[in-house]
Amino acid sequence: MNVRAALAEAAREVARRGLVTGTAGNVSLRNGNELLVTPTGRDLATVTESDIVTLDAEGRVLGGGKPTSEWQLHRAILAARPDLAAVVHTHSPHATAASALKRNIPAVHYMVVAAGGADIPCAPYATPGGEVLAAHAAAALAGRDACLLAHHGALAAGPTLAAAIALAVVVEDLARTWLTLLAVTPDPPSLGADDIAAMRTAWAAYRGSA
Ligand code: 13P
């Protein structure tokens, strides 16, 4: 499958998994010095290879129609993180609800290490589709591969489209677990630093064996 077809298939997969509704969400993929992104204003379930937009390193359109309004966010993250190649922005229901709390998701479950640390950070709110939000998102992803965007949704990134989508699913699941716990207690217990460190080692071994 060529890269544009792969990105379109990833966009449809994000929709199939219920991580977006309506025209929410967007997906990007690094392709050498270019950035491939989904088009703006489209239901990701319907995106096909010919809809994919190609941008240069400065964000100029090289091919395709109008890029996602969040292209700056995707560009900022991938520029700052050469180890990543794909970014998924969702409005998945529990992560989006959790984002309004403007708090990092704590280590209520061991899978938090899938994003690279002991929590899922929450980037401050900024108007969608702008450079300020892009800067907040890139800062939040400096030490993690996923974050919440306050009052907005979630971001997950990875070295491949499949890894980014898998992490977006984990973030949604962690947010659901956390919100479920918050309905029971205002201060859910979290794993300690030693358990997180051990789990990060175990996760690296698990990923290595996959
Ligand atoms: P686009 O339709 O421009 O990709 O925007 C959707 C969205 O989720 C904005 O944050």
Image (cartoon, rainbow, N blue to C red):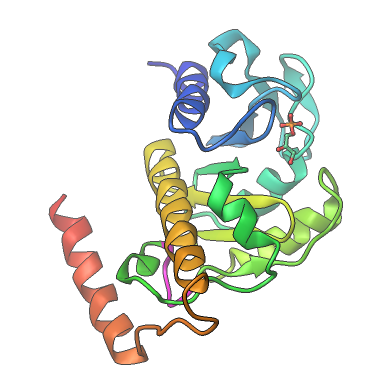
How many numbered discs?
A: 0
The x, y position of residue 39, in whole percent, is: 70, 22
The image quarter containing residue 59 is top right
Query: Relative to 169, is 65 above or below?
Result: above
Using residue 20 as the reference point, say whether residue 167 is left or right of it: left
Q: Residue at x 24, y 66 (%)?
A: 203
Query: Relative to 178, is 192 above or below?
Result: below
Confirm whether the magenta stretch covers residue 10.
no
Main SS type for the magenta part? loop
Q: Residue at x 36, y 90 (%)?
A: 193
Q: Which residues are magenta?
A: 115-119
The x, y position of residue 91, in whole percent, is: 62, 43
Q: Nearer the viewer, residue 54 or 190?
A: 190
Q: Nearer the viewer, residue 179 or 95?
A: 179
Using residue 73 as the reference point, say whether residue 204 is left or right of it: left
Q: Quadrant holding ligand 1? A: top right
Q: Quadrant of the N terminus?
A: top left
Query: Relative to 184, is 192 above or below?
Result: below
Q: Nearer the viewer, residue 22 or 10?
A: 22
Q: Nearer the viewer, residue 192 or 67?
A: 192
The image quarter containing residue 60 is top right
Q: Residue at x 23, y 82 (%)?
A: 198
The x, y position of residue 64, in whole percent, is: 71, 14
The x, y position of residue 52, in whole percent, is: 62, 18
